Amino acid sequence: MMAKIQRFGGAMFGPVIFFIFSGIVVALASVFTNPAIVGSIASEGTLWSNLWNVIEAGGWTVFNNMEVLFVIGLPIGLAKNAHARAAMESFVLYMTFNSFVAAILETFGGTFGIDYSAEAGGQSGLKMIAGVKTLDTGVLGAIVIASIAIYLHNRFFDKKLPDFLGIFQGSAFVGVIGFFVMFVIAFLTSWIWPIIQQGILSLQSVMVNSGNVGVFLYIFLEKALLPTGLHHFIYTPFQYGPAVVEGGTTLYWIDHLREFASSTAPLKQLFPEGGFALQGISNWFGIPGIALAFYSTAKPENRKKVLALIIPGVLTSVFAGITEPFDYTFLFIAPVLFLIHALLAATMATTMYIFGVVGDMQGGLIELIAKNVIPMGANHWQTYTILVILGIAFSAIYFFVFRFLILKFDFKTPGRGESEEEVELYTKKDYKDKKNKVSSGGNAYRDQAGVFLEALGGSENIVAVSNCATRLRVTVADETKVKSDEAFLKGKAHGVVRKGKAFQVIVGLSVPQVREEFEALVNDETKTITNEQMV
């Protein structure tokens, strides 16, 4: 069950990657169309303003279609086969569901407490999705329908029908079954969801009023659950759903950028919900402090190698907001240090919230500058001054706490073990010389995939494959056939998570390419074995 949940969480990352650039585009457009920042050139009706309005419209595409993005993206990561067809089926069933809901509400809306004649948006509980006015079930509704579509695809796509019904095989069969399933779910949703919407409105108030304690728990759980993959289920309802503010903190911040930027009121007063969008702060200040502690506690002869190992991870964390490659460098050496990281991250975010730091600070430094500092700097520079001062102070706290614990308990962090292998940066030649693996034809991603496939017991041992931001997630048939972590290190893995038959190979930001090559190798080897058996 845990493996399935982890795989689901990883698949959710696919649609999320589009939000980063789109958010930057919308933020920059808000800056460049604000006369208070760039002058009269940005006045309404000027060529400059009109051009940026067009650019901004393009930037809103992803945010205006988040539900559809998840409906299409999840099957790509979770379908067992024919991923493209699964994505098409998911979209068709989702729109069928919304069309059913629209017709039900138009006919029986009063019975369910919905005024279908109201404009979509606001407190109406309605939303326009791909041209259909339907209940606003948000990303959660999209995920539920996509999950059902994926189940139907995996269950019925390969179903063999009698020859005279052959036209209904494959995607068509999934669509036929899904049609009736969506009809039932649409009625249930029309009845239950309006009640849930009222409950969510109450939940928003509770979460906002929980203040500092709520912020602390949110940040701590988001960090602490990272190894399990369940952190996706913590931040998604807040960041992209209605848990604390309508539309999620990301969308709400972008939608009110211009209003916040022109106001001189404190940002915390304008956007108190912004305390639930501060998880990126530990990426900029916490990780560098940890890295410095690793470097200072490494053996002198190993420090250059440690530096080469941690610098890419620090830069990725600070600028892109992706911390997993660095987290896993120490998570499996000394798990208690990861718990300390989660506690410090929550303490830092809560402290900053107390001092008035809020905003959309969930990613890397690039996002911080584009979506916060540039548009808000003129009237809210004090907030970012506090952010930097407290951030530097917490970097020092991170450094001293981690250095003390590493030395006190002699944790074998990089550069402190008896073997130098732990900090060596392996080359393709290194593992080619030691491992007899599938020929790669000069493809670096396939080289890595070949190492990982062999370490996981070969293609016959592979049951399912997926990935998240930095991890290759694999379910195997027999975990005893999986080799030691050293075998994975030869493929430049940052670490391996083992949970029964579920394995997570920490690859880094190139994991999508490695996964493609991995699946290709599995398919090639499977075909070869099948052909040999036939002969």
Image: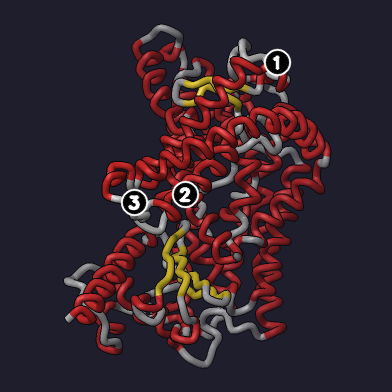
Mark 1–mark 3 Cα distance, whole angstroms, equals 43 Å
Q: Name the residue under label 2.
A: 152
Residue that protrudes farthest toward the top in the picture: 45
Q: Which residue is found at the position 41% from the left and 40% from the top?
A: 175
Examine the rendered structure and indicate whether residue 206 appears above or below residue 488.
Answer: above
Residue nearest the viewer, comparing 12 with 294: 12
Q: How crowded is mark 1: few (under 14 residues within 10 Å), some or many (20 or more)?
A: few
Q: What residue type is labelled 1?
A: Gly
Looking at the image, is mark 1 or mark 3 earlier in the sequence?
1
Element type where label 2 sits in the image: helix
At label 3, the amino acid type is: Leu
Residue 110 is tagged as 1
Q: Which residue occupies 35% across, 44% down? A: 171
Nearer to the camera, 66 or 43? 66
* Percent position of residue 1, x then y: 60, 65
Location of residue 332 (image quadrant):
bottom right
Sequence-first disc among 1 and 2: 1
Identity of the residue drawn at 49% across and 24% down? 30
Give x and y (percent) for residue 443.
22, 68
**In the rendered image, is residue 28 in sight?**
no
Residue 505 place in picture, x, y as percent: 46, 71
Q: In this view of the protein, which residue sits in the foreground, 182 or 507?
A: 182
User: Which disc, if any, is residue 294?
Assistant: none
